[in-house]
Image (cartoon, rainbow, N blue to C red):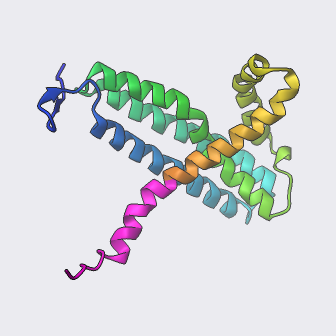
Amino acid sequence: MAVAPDRANGTVAMVSLAHLKRRLGQYAAVWVSAFLLSGTAILVGLWFADLMAAADAVLPVGLALTALTLGAGVVASLMSRETVGTKLLVLLLAGLLVLPLLWAPVSAAVAIAFFADRSIEYSEAYAGFQIGVSRVLFPIGQALGDGDLFGWVWSAFQWVSTLVGFLSALAKVWPMLKRLLGPEPATES
């Protein structure tokens, strides 16, 4: 296994920050793509079916593709020549960020339902996603307090996942905007 040298001070780094930055950039691209593709597919599906039927057709595919893409990135990192510390950190980040990433296609359906003034809870795919996430979050709510806390944990999950997605999108879009707007004007001295 190759060890990544730290060019700044000539020592051996335990974690490759460049690799992590590349993987987080890819995570951001997957989040934005999952949101946009699922949203577009649901909107196209509205020409042929009801919102709930379109969401039920699109969300399972969107969730599966999103999970497979995350898995492919993790496997690529594990198969790479990166250090064990880098691989472990990639695994840890993937575990922490998998639910916010899976929220991307679902949040597109939620946003469309909001603007259509419809309740997304009637979608079987959304209900299945909520049940699956609740199986992960309910024990956390139980550990923190009573079962009544689950509603708060679910709301917190939605907000945190949306914030992670927004920050991911911003991290991906900001450099493009800076290039589009051009370089900063030179200051005269």
Determine the image quadrant of residue 78: top left
Asked which quadrant contains residue 178, the reply is bottom left
75 drawn magenta? no
Left or right: 95 with respect to 46? left
**Outermost residue, front direction?**
189
Residue 114 on image: x %, y %: 79, 59
In front here: 61 or 25? Answer: 25
Q: Which residues are magenta?
A: 169-189
In the drawing, does residue 93 fall left or right of residue 155?
Answer: left
Residue under the image location 64 percent in, 42 percent down: 160
Viewer-proximal residue among 76 and 87:
87
The overriding secondary structure of the stretch rendered in magenta is: helix
Q: Quadrant of the N terminus?
A: top left
- Horizontal and vertical percent position of residue 135: 73, 23
For the point 79% across and 18% down, the residue is: 142
Left or right, 183 with reference to 148 = left
Location of the C terminus (image quadrant): bottom left
Q: Which of the 4 image quarters holds residue 147?
A: top right
- Count of marks placed on residues: 0
Residue 187 in view: yes
Residue visible at 33% across and 30% down? 77
> Is residue 181 located in the magenta-colored stretch of the structure?
yes
- The residue at the far bottom in this view is 188
Residue 104 position within the rendered picture, expressed as x and y whole percent measured from the top left:
61, 47
Q: Is residue 49 visible?
A: no
Q: Is residue 116 above or below residue 166?
A: below
Pinpoint residue 133: horizontal percent, then vertical percent.
71, 30
